[in-house]
Amino acid sequence: MSKTTQGATPKSQKKTAPAKARATAAEQEEAIAPVSNLESRVEAYRELCGAFVKYPCVMRPSALTGFERRRHVRDTIVEDHAVRIDEKAEGAREKFEELAGSLYSFFRGTSLLFHRDMLGEDERMPTVLALGDVHPENFGIMPNADNVPIFGVNDFDDVLYAPFTWDLKRGATGFLIASEEIGGHKKKLRKKITCEFLKGYREGIGFYARHDKEASQQMRADNSPKVVRRMFKKAAKSRKAWLWDRYLNETGRGFPANEELTPISSRIDEFQGYVNEVAKQNGIAPQGRAGELRVKDVCIRHGQGTASLGLPRYYCLIEGPSKDATDDLIVEFKRARRSALEGLVPENDFFAGREGDRITHGQAVHLANGDVFYGSVEIDGMSFMSRERAPFRDDIDLDDLSDKSWKHYAHACGLALAQAHARSDDAGELDYRIEPRILEAMAPDELFMDDILCFARSAVKRLKTDHRFYKRDLALGAFDMSQKRYR
């Protein structure tokens, strides 16, 4: 919340004003400096979080109304996108327009704003490795270590150790918004869909508390609910067709140049080093379906994601074992950022790592036997995470769901999230069984679910107001430049 300050020159100093006016160019440049203080604001919110936990009457951003709330929304979004705005990053304007397009897009793309409203919340609740950004489209089909398609949580950009309720509250809010805006459902059905998400989670935690199978269990095409099995069928596609339809040029030796992909073949040797680094991290031998792990081509990928629009993203084409452009692999490198939950969750004893390492830790914890190409490297002085793209990597098409399928899908997402949380004491930092503690914290079940629903309804109401503020500010140019602080 920067301000431009202008002080009048005292009469006693007016004779010296001309001398002060002859400041050096460096001093003049220093007088106007961009507000690059994401770090300082994170620490400020961390202190506020501690104050709220200690003194529960401390006001949080969620209590702001009117113009003060509008300024908070604007300042938080500018802060979250400061680098993209200052660098005039490709895709930044596209993201801002997408956020204006629908409430659901706004919800998906403003995780920092959402979580600042939760600052310090649920300090007494059991801690898990939280996904951080739970919504209906952050579950999907992806490859496991054996290149077999599985269903589960699939976006680890915001993972952080936090109360388990943080994921449930964001997930419930996401299902309420999506079922209204995309599904077109009335209030009663929206409640039922959201309750199925919470019931699925409760069922999953109860199962793992009794059977302790979270370390190895996977949701595959042969053991998934019907609504998820349909996703597997839709995602089924031969690797050859997938490669040639979208990712190979006419020779089969590299990427095509189009609006989605820009080849940068001059950097093949550089990215070969990054691929080798990931292979070393994860013990991937140059054999089997990875072939010789040889990079054939590299490209920039444009216009992908919602929250990450405008951030650098690269694809590496890896030559497959047959060397005939039918079984090549694609490894993605995506810019890693600070978790939106950083400094906002109640203090705990567990550390997930920094940036790319944190995301890699999240994938390893949340998925049993997951994608072996998840890793962390530094590119151009920035942290990047890596993962494999695959022909069967796919998300749900919410438009295609019937009323009954919405409920079944929400239940399946709850089950998947339960397994991710339950693995916090197997592959994560927790040194005690977490499931019994979560079950105890959820009792009595009906009261717990009603509390989550009440939170979600309040969050939806607040988000609708925030979205109106945002669209007004966007039209007035609020996000064309980052804020500056003047002397």
Image: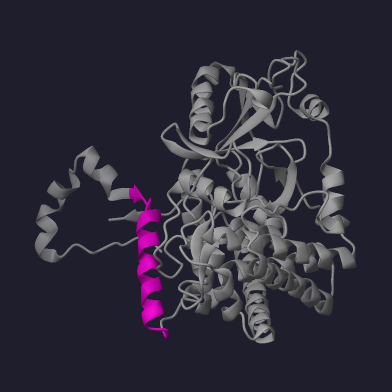
Compared with 341, 382 (above or below) is above
Q: In the rendering, at what x and y percent does residue 324 appear? A: 76, 15
What is the magenta range? 33-57
Quadrant (top left, top right, bottom left, bottom right) of the N terminus: bottom left
Task: Answer yes or no: is residue 481 visible.
Answer: no
Compared with 189, 263 (above or below) is above
Q: Is residue 88 left or right of residue 190?
A: left
- Residue 38 part of the magenta segment: yes
Q: In the rendering, at what x and y percent does residue 82 appear? A: 47, 49
Residue occupying image coordinates x 73% and y 73%: 199
Residue occupying image coordinates x 35% and y 62%: 43
Q: Is residue 335 left or right of residue 30?
A: right
In terms of image quadrants, where is residue 15?
bottom left
Q: Is residue 391 left or right of residue 23?
A: right
Q: Is residue 168 left or right of residue 44?
A: right
Colour setting: one colour
User: Which residue occupies the foreground of this view, 382 or 64?
Assistant: 382
- Residue 349 part of the magenta segment: no
Residue occupying image coordinates x 84% and y 35%: 237
Q: Report the magenta stretch's main SS.
A: helix
Task: Answer yes or no: is residue 151 visible.
Answer: yes
Q: How many marks?
A: 0
Q: In the rendering, at what x and y percent does residue 207 appear? A: 69, 68
Residue occupying image coordinates x 73% and y 47%: 150
Q: In the rendering, at what x and y percent does residue 318 appear? A: 64, 23
Compared with 158, 248 (above or below) is above
Quadrant (top left, top right, bottom left, bottom right) of the C terminus: bottom left
In terms of image quadrants, where is residue 440?
bottom right
Compared with 144, 288 (above or below) is above
